[in-house]
Amino acid sequence: MKIFNKKIAVLAVLLVLITAQSCKKDYLETKPTQQLSAGTVFSSLKGAQGAVQGIHRMLYLYDAQGTFGLASLNINMDMLGEDLVMHNAGNGWYNAAYRWTEFRNVASGDLNYYYFYLYRIIRNANEVIDGITQETADFKQLKAQAHYYRAFCHYMLVQLYGVRYDTTPGAANSGLGVVLSLKNDFAKKPRNTVAEVYASINSDLTIAATDIAGYTRKAKDEININVVKALQARVALTTGKWAEAVTLANDAMVGFPLMSRADYEAGFNNTSNSEWIWGSTTIEEQIDNYFGSFFAYMSLDLSSTNIRQNPKKINADLYNAFPNTDVRLKNFASTATEFAPLVPSNFTTARYQSKKFRAAGLNFGAGGLVYMRSAEMYLIKAEAQARNNDEPGARATLFTLVNARNPNYVLSTKTGAALIDEILLNRRLELWGEGRRFLDLKRLDAPLDRTLTGGHTATLTGNVLNVPAGDKRWQFLIPRAEIDATGADIMKQNEL
């Protein structure tokens, strides 16, 4: 694999340092940035901290109006599902993803962006892992965070560009995954198997969990043991390790109690929320362009053209599947004008539009970005319990979560597939807009079905109302630039 040329790669760690310290003008000014070597950077704790902070910053690094790191990838994950409904085409952003054409075009800008973006984070994580040689606790926890980021990005890449992980007992999972990038050696490498990629992910996370166990972080932007356990729980669920998923989800949620019903309506924009395990706290000075922010596309009230013209809505079928005593429904409009008092008169409003995400101001793109919550851990635990023949435990876990959202909810009496369906239904409503739907459909080997009365139109979806389970479109294509650089004989393309 040959993703980036050598000149850019050598500067990788320097670029993250510049990014991390862009507001600290005196940082490392004693030596021209171009002359800094990796050895210089990692010879001090401050330098190593700067490199890891730079990786944190890359999660919301602005590239272009529709591509701004992990939050924009999460938008795409929901655009590819059935639960987020576009009111109209607006000014065009994310339309191609909604129509399932963006990631089946080898020259697509977004296809290329996310592929190279995730590998860029991996490359910077490799710099940290290889550059830190000190064995003190402070250095080891920084190295652990880099192992986490490498695992996280490989996990995202293999889910998007690789074959679905088959959870059938004994399945070899020998299909094509993605290239494992564990050294910045510029070698042209073929794609690893799905099994090999997941083995590496689990290895990195085991190292991270060991070396970060005693670390107390300063903010939720940083990685701590809860974040590592939460990702391990996600991976265990994806790979059908049910007992492990239960234990890991339990561990991950410790110290992150479920939010109050009042907080659930507060706008999902503050990392101080009690159940947010991992997120980014952005400030206006860090947002290069407020149109390049999550809130410019998914909020109720940021004054961007996209928000004013194209409010994002929940699938009506999903909305109608829940009782009106569930606080989660209060984040969606029951009538076309319910949220009109909350926005200026030039904003389009619509029935079922979302106010789950609120901007800090009409022209303010910064705010808290959520990546992991304890609510998701309850859902992982409940699903894994149900699939592992612990239905009483699954019902009790589900009750804890849903009763916190709906005081009238009673303990489920469902069993078998019906119980799993109830858990998955709550997962859809709970995690709406947080970037989980495409990944869930793929891991469950479930079809995309937009044909009910939920609000999708053939015009806006490009007539993509159904995508069967196992269809070739569930795999993103490998970018043409990667194929050309590595060679088609080495870098195999997914089915066109």
Image: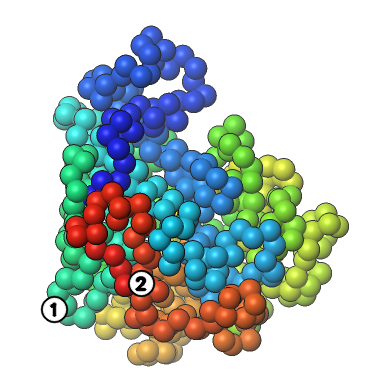
SS for dot 2: loop
Of callouts 1 and 2, the N-terminal one: 1
- The residue indicated by pointer 1 is 170
Question: What secondary structure is found at the residue carrying circle 1?
Answer: loop
Left or right of 182, for residue 305: right
Disc 1 residue type?
Gly
For the C terminus, give its image quadrant. Answer: bottom left
Q: Tell me where residue 232 appears, x and y as whole percent.
A: 28, 59
Residue that appears at 57% across and 86% down:
451
Say which quarter of the image contains residue 256: bottom left
Which is closer to the viewer, label 1 or label 2? Answer: 2
Identified by mark 2, the residue type is Leu
The answer to whether residue 270 of the structure is visible from this angle is: no
- Numbered label attached to residue 496: 2
Residue 300: name its quadrant.
bottom right
Residue 69 position, x and y percent, is 47, 48
